[in-house]
Amino acid sequence: MNFALSYDDGARLKNLDAADLILLGVSRSGKTPTCLYLALQFRRARRQLPLTQEDFLGDGLPPVLQPHRRVLFGLSIAPERLQQIRQQRRADSEYASLARCRQEAHWAERLYAAHGIPFLNTTAM
């Protein structure tokens, strides 16, 4: 649990080797609660990293993640649901716009598919 909280939201990028699982997903896709649940259930080291626009600009997996492909797992979410969640956090912002939510959700799923990263849709969870 302490490991999951210490590395919440990509706070630190070192010690990725200690993670049994690294959750990827756009902001507000459910990474933190999923990580905490897994940490409580399995008492193993879990990390979560947010995918940002910078991560989607390159042609590949972000370099910091490349050595850890075997422990990557993605979360996706429907853009409309993502917008609802983000509106509660930052109403009427670019961050919460439907266009940005659509773009980020599309980019994340494209990244997962391109690199064979298994993922789960968290829209109804």
Image: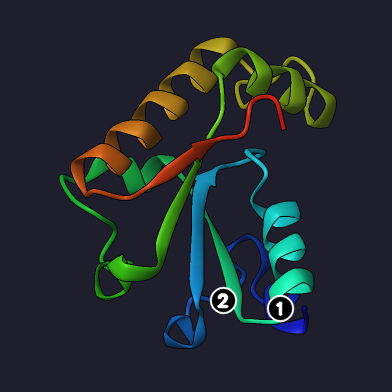
User: If you read the primary sequence from the N terminus, does the residue marked by circle 1 or circle 2 appear first?
Assistant: 1
Front residue of 13/44: it is 44
Q: Residue drawn at (71%, 56%), measured in percent from left and top?
A: 32
Which mark, by number, is residue 40? none
State the scheme by which the image is colored: rainbow
Q: Secondary structure at mark 1?
A: helix
Give the quadrant of the N terminus. bottom right
The answer to whether residue 121 is left or right of residue 72 is: right
Which quadrant of the structure image shows residue 57? top left
Vertical comparison of 110 with 66: above or below: above
Front residue of 74/51: it is 74
Q: Quick one: which residue is furthest to the right in this view?
A: 88
Q: Amino acid at mark 2?
A: Arg
**x, y percentage for residue 58?**
21, 46
Give the quadrant of the C terminus. top right
Which mark, by number, is residue 12? 2
Q: Residue drawn at (45%, 29%), measured in percent from left and top?
A: 104
The answer to whether residue 117 is left or right of residue 50 is: left
Q: Amino acid at mark 1?
A: Ser
**x, y percentage for residue 14?**
47, 84
Q: CA distance from mark 1 to mark 2?
A: 8 Å
Q: Residue drawn at (64%, 24%), measured in percent from left and top?
A: 82
Number of other residues with Cα within 10 Å of mark 2, as a class: few under 14, some 14 to 19, many 20 or more: few
Q: Secondary structure at mark 2?
A: loop
The residue at which mark 1 appears reads as 6
Residue 52 visible to an observer of this rendering? yes
